[in-house]
Amino acid sequence: MIKIKNLSHTYKNREDAAVKNISLHIKKGESVVIIGSSGSGKSTLLKCINRLIEPESGKILIQNEEILNCSLKKAARIRGKIGMIFQNFNLLERETVMKNVLNGRLKYNSAFNTLLGRFSREDYLIARENIARVGLQEYENERIANLSGGQKQRVAIARALSQKPSIILADEPVSSLDPKLMKEVMDLLKKICTEKKITLVTSLHFLDFAKKYGSRIIGVRDGEIVFDGTPKELTEKDIVDIYGATRDWYMYGKTGF
Ligand SMILES: Nc1ncnc2c1ncn2[C@@H]1O[C@H](COP(=O)(O)OP(=O)(O)OP(=O)(O)O)[C@@H](O)[C@H]1O
Ligand SMILES: [Mg+2]
């Protein structure tokens, strides 16, 4: 589903590369969780996968199609297969739940209809179905600004689903939520992706979460992969390799419930 080869990226005005020569294959239906300390390169890696940032070098294939080194038009088409969920939701706060979820249908819409903000009956049906799927049917016409954090992230999930994605990339999707909501939102995301056979790549801060929701864990440190295996294979030594030989990693160990 995703093939990454020798991916490197250095931000402008930075000496060190944020992502260093990463190679990685992710299969259809996998639930991959990326862990690592703050600044280790998790977000950079995720943003390279759908070319939200233009990496310096390397190859990325999405379902055997190269998303780098191609026209922006082709990249946009490939990006259409990838739903994205962010820590800070990235929703239109002043718009309704329905409007936000409909935006997931934009890639299926003509430029003319998009300009006029028109969507087809089918688009509405799909949006409505996904709003119900995340349990927000009663909030369809509510403005985002009036929702709780957990509800907002559900809207973002419904928007991603309306894209009918093969892949969902979620960058710390539950970091802005309290522990109870964190679990609720992750349970929902994982369940839907399993049901619909969507490949899920998530970055998460807490180890117990990573172990619970990942079928595969990838540990990054200073832009490099230092662990790649199942939750069961992750030893205490690996955890020190990922987070460093400080006691800091203990703070990643528990979410507090
Ligand atoms: N837009 C940017 N411009 C310059 N440097 C950046 C930019 N974004 C990230 N970096 C740097 O790249 C490195 C990796 O950052 P990245 O955001 O990928 O880490 P992260 O693992 O997602 O961290 P966190 O857990 O805090 O979200 C860091 O050293 C960071 O300072
Ligand atoms: Mg990040």
Image (spheres, rainbow, N blue to C red):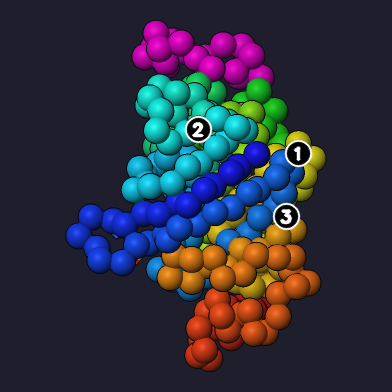
Residue occupying the point 48% across, 60% down? 42
- Mark 2 and mark 1: Cα distance apart in space: 22 Å
Do residues under tags 2 and 1 come within 8 Å of each other at their CB atoms?
no
Q: Secondary structure at mark 3?
A: helix
Does mark 1 have its CB less than 8 Å from ligand 2?
A: no
- Range of magenta residues: 108-125
Q: Is 111 placed above or below 127 here?
A: above
Q: Nearer the viewer, mark 3 or mark 1?
A: 1
Residue occupying the point 39% across, 33% down? 69
Q: Nearer the viewer, mark 3 or mark 2?
A: 2
- Mark 3 and mark 1: Cα distance apart in space: 15 Å
Q: Amino acid at mark 2?
A: Glu
The image shows residue 63 at horizontal and vertical percentages of 62, 33
Question: Splitting the image into 4 quarters, where does residue 75 fall?
Answer: top left
Do residues under tags 3 and 2 come within 8 Å of each other at their CB atoms?
no
Q: Quadrant of the C terminus?
A: bottom right
| Residue topped by disc 2 | 66
Q: Is 170 placed above or below 238 here?
A: above
Q: Nearer the viewer, mark 2 or mark 1?
A: 2
Does mark 2 have its CB less than 8 Å from ligand 1?
A: no
| Residue topped by disc 1 | 197
Which numbered tag is attached to residue 187?
3
In terms of secondary structure, what is the magenta stretch mainly? helix
Kindly tell me whether residue 92 is visible in this rendering. yes
Decide which of tag 2 and tag 1 comes sooner along the chain.
2
Residue occupying the point 43% across, 46% down? 58
Q: Amino acid at mark 3?
A: Asp
Q: Residues within 10 Å of mark 2 (few under 14, many from 20)?
A: some
Decide which of tag 3 and tag 2 comes sooner along the chain.
2
Q: Nearer the viewer, residue 146 or 21?
A: 21
The image shows residue 197 at horizontal and vertical percentages of 75, 39
Find out whether residue 114 is within the magenta segment: yes
